[in-house]
Image (cartoon, helix red, strand yellow):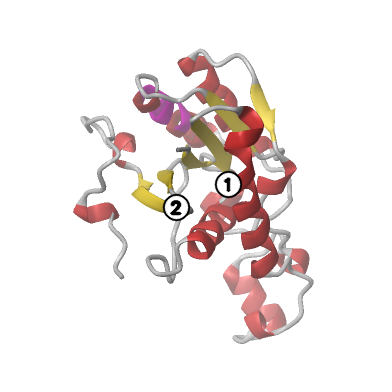
Amino acid sequence: MATIGFVRHGLTDWNALGRAQGLSDIPLNGEGRQQAKLLAERLKNGPWEAIVTSTLIRAKETAEIIAHELGVRDVIQEHCIREIDCGLIEGTTEEQRIQTWGQQWRDLDLRMEPYEAVAARGSRFVNDISNKLNHQYILAVSHGAVIGLTLQYLMPHRFRATYIDNASLTVITQVGDHWECSLYNDIRYLQKDSIAYTYEPTNRNEVSP
């Protein structure tokens, strides 16, 4: 029975500006590095045996900070949990997209990677990684769109829509032939005097059916 802790990378300058990052290789900013350190503090007494990361630098930096705190020597890079390719909207803000393509820009072909393709590679990663690494508890540092679309694909009865915060933790566990989510988009450890997370979701983190 595998358990995967999905972590979204810490904050970047482009996140703060509301710019679509996609495959642009933007590093963490100071706040993002601090978020990763706080998250690492909360994970260090957990059961995590391995850390896997997207190949993009913002995820790798987050993973390396966590690995240092947890004493995990090797961080494994996986191309399939890179962020969605944002095509022509990469680097733009919502305001710029509306100015350039109009309010209905989402209906246009702007060379973005299809959501279905992102969900498929995310779910393939989830189903393959525990066997590949022969570990039960795995942290996977990835990106908002990948994590959210993977959850929607694996658990459509629970996740009709998702929002994944920077440096958040989402925990899923394989139960028989399906996956269950015990913690969703948890950022309590970023708050002062917060308590360490558990696998039991609180009301704040439950997803409406």
CA gap between label 1 and label 2 equals: 9 Å
Q: How crowded is the residue under tag 1: few (<14 C-alpha within 10 Å), some, or many (20+)? A: many
Residue 126: which disc? 1
Q: Are marks 1 and 2 in contact (CB under 8 Å)?
A: yes
Instruction: Identify which residue is drawn at 50% across, 24% down.
Output: 66
The magenta-colored residue range is: 36-41
Q: How dense is the environment of label 2, judged by Cα within 10 Å: few (below 14), some, or many (20 and up)?
A: some
Residue depicted at x 49% and y 58%: 151
- Mark 1: which amino acid? Val
State the mark number for residue 179: 2
* Residue 98 visible to an observer of this rendering: yes
**Viewer-closest of 184 and 106:** 184
Q: Position of residue 108 (x, y in %)?
A: 72, 83
Q: Is residue 208 magenta?
A: no
Q: Earlier in the sequence, mark 1 or mark 2?
A: 1
Q: Residue at x 77, y 65 (%)?
A: 87
* Residue at disc 1, secondary structure: helix
Q: Position of residue 50 (x, y in %)?
A: 55, 25
Residue 68: x and y in percent read 53, 16
Which residue is at the front of the view, 144 or 47?
A: 47
Residue type at mark 2: give it. Answer: Trp
